[in-house]
Amino acid sequence: MTSQCHSTREESAPDRPARQAANRVGDAELLHAARECVLANGVRRTTLTEIARRAGVSRMTLYRRFPDVDSLVTALMTVEFGEILQLADAGQPTGNGRQRLVSATVHGVRLLQAAPLLQRVLETDAELLLPYLVERLGSTQLAAEGFIREYLARGHEDGSIRPADPAVQARALLLLVQSFVISAHPAADGVDPAALTDELTHLLDGALGPEPADA
């Protein structure tokens, strides 16, 4: 696939945008240019020079705001993940706390499984995610955990979620849910991917339900 973002001859790009004044280009435009380049080439093959060309700014202008491609991609993933959390949260006005948590979480997983940027990273540069699986939690994981904790609080209040330490409960749910995102492609080998994600609904509902009352 030929990409505007990967040309080595700047003067030959016929549809390259005219270079804009630095103070007229917002971060959103720079992130959009980075997104287009990553979707076309993956993270490892994207450079600041290519992103700057795509955004119509000088490399130095871009460098002053983002020192490297990793910082750009991190900012981009944070923004897109935040938008996905907002979408997952929308349309959950009814039901008890557990029902709303399960519905919003599974909806969020489906959105992430279909997110072009994340899927491109998993396809071409999955090793970039390894530190966040074996060394430390990243900002997007912590945002997801915060999202879960808000729903847990509602479920604890209305009694639809069994009492437990919310920090431990949220962390355990995060570990479960992220596997349905990161490992969705290989895990779907031999099974229906939609049915596999449907099963997450039952796992969450069963794990969070109140303990049965003593007879």
Image: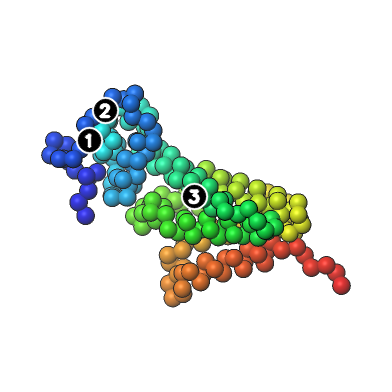
Q: Secondary structure at mark 3?
A: helix
* Amino acid type at image mark 3: Ile
Where is mark 2, residue-wise? 20
* Quadrant including the C terminus: bottom right
Are the residues at dot 1 and dot 2 in contact (C-beta closer than 8 Å)?
A: yes
**Residue 54, visible in the rendered structure:** yes
Task: Give neighbour class at mark 1: few <14, some 14-19, many 20+ (Cα, 10 Å).
Answer: few
Are the residues at dot 3 and dot 1 in contact (C-beta closer than 8 Å)?
A: no
In the image, is 178 to the left or to the right of 154?
left
- What residue is rendered at 53% in x and 47% in y? 86
Where is mark 1, residue-wise? 17
* Amino acid type at image mark 1: Pro
**How far apart, in angstroms, are the residues tagged by discs 3 and 1?**
29 Å
Task: Give above or below for 160 relative to 8.
Answer: below
Question: In terms of depth relative to the viewer, which is nearer, 124 or 15?
Answer: 15
| Res 84 label | 3
Name the image quarter holding residue 52.
Answer: top left
Q: Earlier in the sequence, mark 3 or mark 2?
A: 2
Q: Secondary structure at mark 2?
A: loop
In the image, is 44 to the left or to the right of 142?
left
Task: Give neighbour class at mark 3: few <14, some 14-19, many 20+ (Cα, 10 Å).
Answer: some
Q: Residue 18, image x and y in percent?
A: 21, 31
Question: In terms of depth relative to the viewer, which is nearer, 129 or 3?
Answer: 3
- What residue is rendered at 60% in x and 48% in y? 147
* Amino acid type at image mark 2: Gln
- What residue is rendered at 45% in x and 52% in y? 130
